[in-house]
Amino acid sequence: MPLLTTPYAELDLIRQPEQANDPLQAFDAADEYLLAQLHAQAPDANCRVLVLNDSFGAVAANLAGKVQVTSSGDSHLAHMALEKNLARNGLPFDSVPFVPASEHWQGPFDRVLLRVPKTLALLEEQLIRLQGQLAPTAQVIAGAMVKHLPRAAGDLLEKYIGPVQASLAQKKARLLTATLAERPLARSPYPSRYRLDTPALELLNHANVFCREGLDIGTRAFLPHLPRDLGRARVADLGCGNGVLAIASALANPDAEYTLVDESYMAVQSARENWRAALGERPATFEAADGLAGVEKQSLDVVLCNPPFHQQQVVGDFLAWRMFQQAREALVVGGALYIVGNRHLGYHSKLARLFRGVEQVAATPKFVILKARK
């Protein structure tokens, strides 16, 4: 894989999660452009820089030891990538502080280097949180590949930070530089909420939660077919989002034990708050993690999963396949993985390569609900 060479460093970087012969690199031209722009401003070692949404640590790792850098974002995998890439390049794994999106950072910051996220609600929430966290001469420099840069990103920067200057494109990347100006204090519209009739729930959703404005159609197809009569089963909701699968299952299985896992910090935050609202002090475990990678082998009886089919802008079944493998490792012999998936993704044949038996529990014109037994 090519090295990332910038005015600050030459780094050997990897993506997370790792996969053999990964054809994708852990940085792009927008990362290079952001770093070149900052370097051209000649910040001194005391300059406080906040890096947002740095997918694999490429930007923050470059700045380690050069300025006072803090990294923040909503991806646990991004946090893992930052630590691994620091260590991979001879730097202490904890040399760049990381603040999960479920927590608040502490300014004032002189510069913010921001990768425009796929979810504009996350961008809006981050810009609102920057109010009161910026030094008087601060700039917010947002970078993206041109094909992934919506006009609304510039509008949000203008609304919450100040006047925006767009750069020329370089290697199909562009920067938007917002200079701090007086703006009225804004109140965040997040978290948002929506109601379900069956089960009767109001679900809270922080800014980066998938299908924040309403229940996604895959989960809607899954809910009527969640397993019942689980007794004291140990159940994991893998890729839990706002926690709706685990909560609905827990309401129907009062003695079961639940673990809710997602790589999004805001998803886990939402799931925890929704669980408390629906189930009070009933114990459960909530964890931002790399799926079930850290779970003890043969420690679960049931895994519920609505698997993703993309990572940032990259579409594919790599993450889903990995989640199926993790579920198999974590399940006891005789345990079961329940999933919902688009018919065209062919999950039945993939699961049959890992599990002893795979059966179709239900189907709609678009989705299948499958049970795979170990």
Image (cartoon, rainbow, N blue to C red):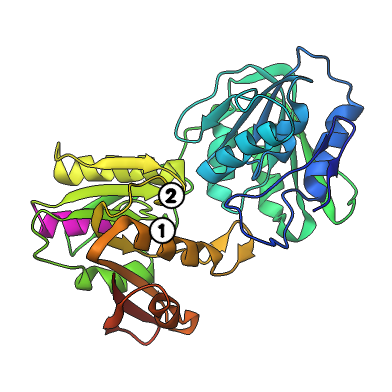
Q: Mark 2 is on which residue type?
A: Ala
Residue in view at x 40 percent, y 72 percent: 354
What percent of the width, then of the height, locates residue 259?
Answer: 27, 47
State the separation of the CA atoms marked 1 and 2. Answer: 6 Å
Residue 252 in magenta stretch: yes
The residue lying toward the viewer, choosing from 343 and 49, is 343
How far across and how far down the image is residue 11, in percent? 80, 38
Asked if one can make out residue 279 in the rendered structure from this viewpoint, the answer is: yes
Q: Is 332 within the magenta?
A: no
Magenta highlight range: 245-254
Residue 293 numbered mark, or none? 2
Quarter of the view holding residue 56: top right
Foreground residue among 180 and 105: 105
Kind of residue indicated by mark 1: Gln
Residue 37, position in %: x, y? 86, 34
Q: In screen coordinates, is 319 left or right of 117?
A: left
Would you call the spot at circle 2 few (<14 residues within 10 Å), some (14-19), or many (20 or more)?
some
Q: Is residue 190 visible?
A: no
Q: Are marks 1 and 2 in contact (CB under 8 Å)?
A: yes
Look at mark 1 in the image and give the residue it sits on: 326
